[in-house]
Image (cartoon, rainbow, N blue to C red):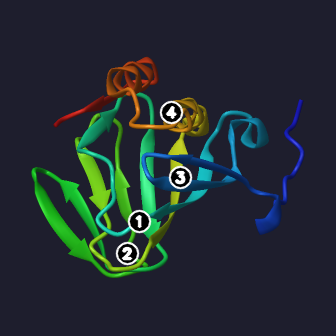
Amino acid sequence: MEMPPVIRKPDEARVIRAFGDEMILHLGVADTGGKFTMWTNVTPPAGGPPPHRHENEDEWFWPLSGPCEFFKDGEWLTVPAKTAAFMPRGSVHTFRNPNAEPLTMLIQTIPGGFENFFAECAEEFSRGGPPDMPKIIEISARHGIYYYL
């Protein structure tokens, strides 16, 4: 069966909050037949995940605002908005927001499903108080994501 076309307006996007970030989900696994996930990520000043790697997804980034900092090959690189970045599965990488205002980036992962990981983590973060980090690490590992702290 062929996938039907999907058009999602901005006000129809699902918003998921975890790690201090906001994921505005444009297209998820259900929309793309598992092929990819696409979202706008909003990261607060000084925010960003710790260095990590994905076993399951290739990930690419398109900062809509900037500058943005990316970690790859053991070093940080500052790039302006509208710089394309690709982090293949297995590579240790991350990003951070060096700005005084939120950083927005269009992010995609292949295959789809990254929103499921983020939503599970959002449940932990929404419980109030500091998150249970061993639980976050367990959720991450179940989704093939490992941190380098």
Residue type indicated by callout 4: Cys
- Report the Cα–Cα distance between label 3 and label 4: 18 Å
Q: Are marks 3 and 2 in contact (CB under 8 Å)?
A: no
Q: Residue visible at 25% across and 62% down?
A: 70
User: Which numbered marker is on residue 108?
Assistant: 3
Q: Are marks 3 and 4 in contact (CB under 8 Å)?
A: no
Q: Could you tell me which secondary element the residue under label 1 belongs to?
A: loop
- Report the Cα–Cα distance between label 4 and label 1: 17 Å
Asked if residue 31 lies left or right of residue 134, the reply is right
Residue 111 visible in image? no
Query: Dot 4, how many residues are within 10 Å of its Cα: few (below 14), some (14-19), or many (20+)?
Result: many
Residue on which disc 4 sits = 121
Q: Could you tell me which secondary element the residue under label 2 belongs to?
A: loop
Query: Dot 2, how many residues are within 10 Å of its Cα: few (below 14), some (14-19), or many (20+)?
Result: some
Residue on which disc 2 sits = 83
**Residue 140 placement (x, y as % from top left):** 40, 26
- Report the Cα–Cα distance between label 3 and label 2: 14 Å
Asked if residue 137 lies left or right of residue 128, the reply is left
Residue at the left extreme?
Answer: 74
Figure quadrant of the C terminus:
top left
Figure disc tally: 4
First in residue order: circle 2 vs circle 1: 1
Residue type indicated by callout 3: Gln
Residue on which disc 1 sits = 44
Q: Residue visible at 76% across and 36% down?
A: 30
- Report the Cα–Cα distance between label 1 and label 3: 19 Å
Residue type indicated by callout 2: Thr
First in residue order: circle 4 vs circle 1: 1
